[in-house]
Image: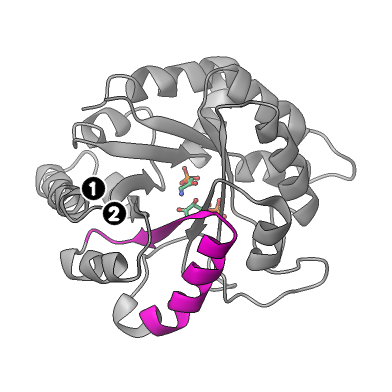
């Protein structure tokens, strides 16, 4: 099986935002990624617009549509309030109709995503959001820790996928805890697939830790941005995309 690579362009936007103007262009790097064979693009618009801006979401939706087989994945917290010209995640999704929306429980003051949903407390308020996204024809993925009890609750919400938050996996690679950590993710992924959920994964995956992670059977998609952008500084964007694709094509 091959795992789809969705290139997250957040950090290209971070560089762009450090000066006036539109350099680097996200449209250019979105095209380079998809021309290089990536199966999709991911963006994570946040209310403070530290990187992805609403205009980027509309621009990249158009880029993805120009590649018939490519997918657009918009991530974010559906409960984060509109702020300035950030209209809220659900408005951006309604306007651009992405293939997938990955719901992430980030608060506005987080440096980055650092945990999955606690569905014991969030399921009730997520249910109408999931329904709304399904009404829009958007596939829903929930950002989750590798916790089987939580994954059971994700299935009850009727979503198609979960995205395993791989921050702890990356943190433990390579260490004495690596094997046990990988096994926890394997068991969570196997369980999720066994109850009918497809499994995505993301956060801090890189060229070193990705091969071991993709020894886990049936990972549908990995979304990678931070390390891939650094690798683009090293090798150029086309070669960086190629190197991740080579690993994804060898997945279990
Ligand atoms: C949800 C997740 O792990 C990442 O996709 C997220 O996009 C990281 O956000 P930053 O790029 O803002 O760190
Ligand atoms: N969902 C994970 C993602 O889109 C990118 O995460 P990272 O590679 O920037 O850590």
Residue at horizontal 73 percent and vertical 74 percent from the top:
82
Report which residue position mark 1 lands on: 172
How many residues crowd mark 2 within 10 Å: few (<14), some (14–19), many (20+)? some
Q: Position of residue 212 (x, y in %)?
A: 22, 32
Residue at horizontal 68 percent and vertical 34 percent from the top:
65
Question: In the displayed image of the protein, which residue is found farthest to the right?
Answer: 21
Foreground pick, 249 / 177: 249
Whether tag 1 and tag 2 are in contact, CB under 8 A, the answer is: yes
Report which residue position mark 2 lands on: 168
- Tell whether 173 sits left or right of 118: left
Please report the bounds of the magenta region as a residue range: 123-146
- Tell whether 242 sits left or right of 217: right
* Quadrant in the picture for the N terminus: top left
* Res. 52 visible in picture: no
* Res. 65 visible in picture: yes
Count of numbered circles in the view: 2
Q: Position of residue 248 (x, y in %)?
A: 35, 25
How many residues crowd mark 1 within 10 Å: few (<14), some (14–19), many (20+)? some
Residue at horizontal 24 percent and vertical 41 percent from the top:
173
* Quadrant in the picture for the C terminus: top left
Q: Position of residue 67 (x, y in %)?
A: 64, 26
Residue at horizontal 34 percent and vertical 22 percent from the top:
247
């Amino acid at each position: 099986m091959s795992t789809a690579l969705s290139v997250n362009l957040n950090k290209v936007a971070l560089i762009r935002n450090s000066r006036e103007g539109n350099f680097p262009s996200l449209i250019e790097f979105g095209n380079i990624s998809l021309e290089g064979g990536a199966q999709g693009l991911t963006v994570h618009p946040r209310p403070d617009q530290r990187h992805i801006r609403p205009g980027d979401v509309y621009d990249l939706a158009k880029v993805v549509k120009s590649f018939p087989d490519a997918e657009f994945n918009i991530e974010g917290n559906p409960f984060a309030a509109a702020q300035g010209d950030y209209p809220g995640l659900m408005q951006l999704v309604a306007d651009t109709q992405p293939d997938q929306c990955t719901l992430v429980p980030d608060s506005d003051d987080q440096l980055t995503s650092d945990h999955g949903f606690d569905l014991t407390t969030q399921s009730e308020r997520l249910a109408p959001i999931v329904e709304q996204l399904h009404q829009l024809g958007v596939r829903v993925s929930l950002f989750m820790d590798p916790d089987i009890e939580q994954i059971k609750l994700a299935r009850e919400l009727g979503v198609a996928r979960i995205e395993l938050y791989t921050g702890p996996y990356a943190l433990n690679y390579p260490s004495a805890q690596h094997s046990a950590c990988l096994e926890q993710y394997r068991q969570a992924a196997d369980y999720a697939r066994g109850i009918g959920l497809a499994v995505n994964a993301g956060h801090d995956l890189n060229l070193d830790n990705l091969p071991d992670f993709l020894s886990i059977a049936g990972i549908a998609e990995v979304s990678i941005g931070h390390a891939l952008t650094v690798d683009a500084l090293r090798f150029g964007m086309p070669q960086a995309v190629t190197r991740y694709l080579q690993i994804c094509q060898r997945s279990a």
